[in-house]
Amino acid sequence: MARQAAAKRYLFLPHAVRQMSRPDRMITTSEVHAVIDHGRVIADYPEDPRGHSCLLLGHGLNGRAIHVVCSPKTEYLAVVTAYVPAASKWNHDYTARSET
């Protein structure tokens, strides 16, 4: 569903732009496109109050893991946020939150 919406166009929400441009992240739009095009869905949120969304895991420059939360709309794919998952908060392959 997310890839079908992305085929139309992307809309980077202000929160996503702020998170992507943090000095400790510096995630490019190209990296977000790569995650959406080649990453995998690791969580689906059909009941999200803002509308159906999902969490994707993919890789950016130098192979770093990147999470992208996006929400497919009729005319576009809304990129809600993008971030580099902290190793201390996720399991070894960044697909599930750690229990600690």
Image (cartoon, helix red, strand yellow):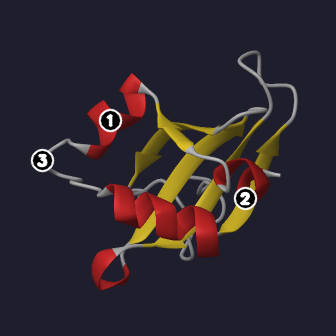
Where on the picture, by quarter, is residue 32? bottom left
Tell me where residue 26 appears, x and y as whole percent: 21, 54
The residue identified by callout 1 is 17
Q: N-terminal of the two: label 1 or label 3? A: 1
Left or right for 76, reference 17: right
Q: Are marks 1 and 3 in contact (CB under 8 Å)?
A: no
Give the residue at the far top of this rendering: 49
Against 52, residue 92 (above or below) is: below
Badge 3 amino acid: Pro
Q: Which mark, residue 3?
A: 2
Q: Nearer the viewer, mark 2 or mark 3?
A: 2
Left or right for 90, reference 49: left
Where on the picture, by quarter, is residue 63? bottom left
The residue identified by callout 3 is 23
Q: Are marks 1 and 2 in contact (CB under 8 Å)?
A: no
Q: Nearer the viewer, mark 1 or mark 3?
A: 1
Against 53, residue 68 (above or below) is: below
Q: Between residue 37 and residue 25, name the one nearer to us.
A: 37
User: Which residue is drawn at the image coordinates 53% and 51% (left, top)?
Assistant: 68
- Residue 87 in view: no
Badge 2 amino acid: Arg
Against 5, residue 29 (above or below) is: below
Q: CA distance from mark 2 to mark 3?
A: 28 Å
Give the residue at the far right of this rendering: 46
User: Which residue is drawn at the image coordinates 29% and 56% (left, top)?
Assistant: 27
User: Which residue is drawn at the image coordinates 59% and 44% (left, top)?
Assistant: 69
Circle 2 packing at 10 Å, graded few (<14), some (14-19), many (20+), is few
Q: CA distance from mark 1 to mark 2?
A: 20 Å
